[in-house]
Image (tube, helix red, strand yellow):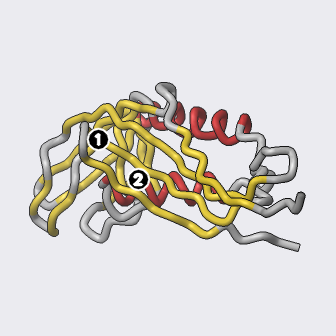
Amino acid sequence: MEHCASATTIELAKESFHFSAAHFTLFSPTSRERLHGHNYTVRCRVNCEVGEAGLAFDYTDLKQRLKDLCASLDEFTLIPKDSPWLDVHEADGQVIVHFNDDTFSLPTKDVRVLPVANITLEALAAHLIDTLLATEDLALAKCSSLTLSVSSSPGIWAEVTSEIVRHG
């Protein structure tokens, strides 16, 4: 019997892939949401070839990395570092954020300043997938793409898909 290569999509959507965080979305140089929080959910889909042993890849490491990424944001206030409308700096153990006529001063230990322009679902999804794929030893050799989705409430998701580039 001839063996035909097949492809599959593996989705990882575990209960541990979540985080709670405060944020505000920026709408313009003078308009923003009030500071508030969400319980975010993360899921991941990977498109892969299935090997002769009936296995696409061992996704134990990917599950742990997703759990760790979520934990790194859990119970923090998220601030965008790359917004053209914010001035963000650190002084005396505080993250100081200036927006229009507002100033926030938050303990550094309670803040994650992220390399994004805004704290939105689409920016969080892009940040998480970039962080995940920047890991050199992530075992995705037979995989062609990875999709990462972030939700802030039931029925609302943003997802980003990246092609997996193989080096060597």
Q: Is residue 66 above or below residue 26?
A: above
Total marks in image: 2
In the figure, is residue 89 to the left or right of 36?
right
Classify the position of the N terminus by image quarter. bottom right
Q: Which mark is residue 88?
A: none
Q: Position of residue 9 (x, y in %)?
A: 59, 52
Q: Secondary structure at mark 2?
A: helix
In the rendered image, which residue does mark 1 sit on?
Answer: 152
Residue placed most toward the observer, 131 or 140 = 140
Mark 2 crowd level (few <14, some 14–19, many ≥20, 10 Å Cα): many
Mark 1 crowd level (few <14, some 14–19, many ≥20, 10 Å Cα): many
**Residue occupying image coordinates x 42% and y 48%:** 90
Q: Position of residue 152 (x, y in %)?
A: 29, 41
Q: Nearer the viewer, mark 2 or mark 1?
A: 1
In the figure, is residue 2 to the left or right of 58?
right
In the figure, is residue 140 to the left or right of 80?
right
Pointer 2 or 1: first along the chain = 2
In the rendered image, which residue does mark 2 sit on?
Answer: 124
The image quadrant of residue 39 is: top left
Q: Position of residue 155 (x, y in %)?
A: 24, 43
**Residue occupying image coordinates x 16% and y 68%:** 29
Give, as a three-letter code, the residue at label 1: Ser
Residue placed most toward the observer, 150 or 54 = 54
Q: CA distance from mark 2 to mark 1?
A: 11 Å
The image quadrant of residue 38 is: top left
In the figure, is residue 8 to the left or right of 56?
left
Give, as a three-letter code, the residue at label 2: Leu
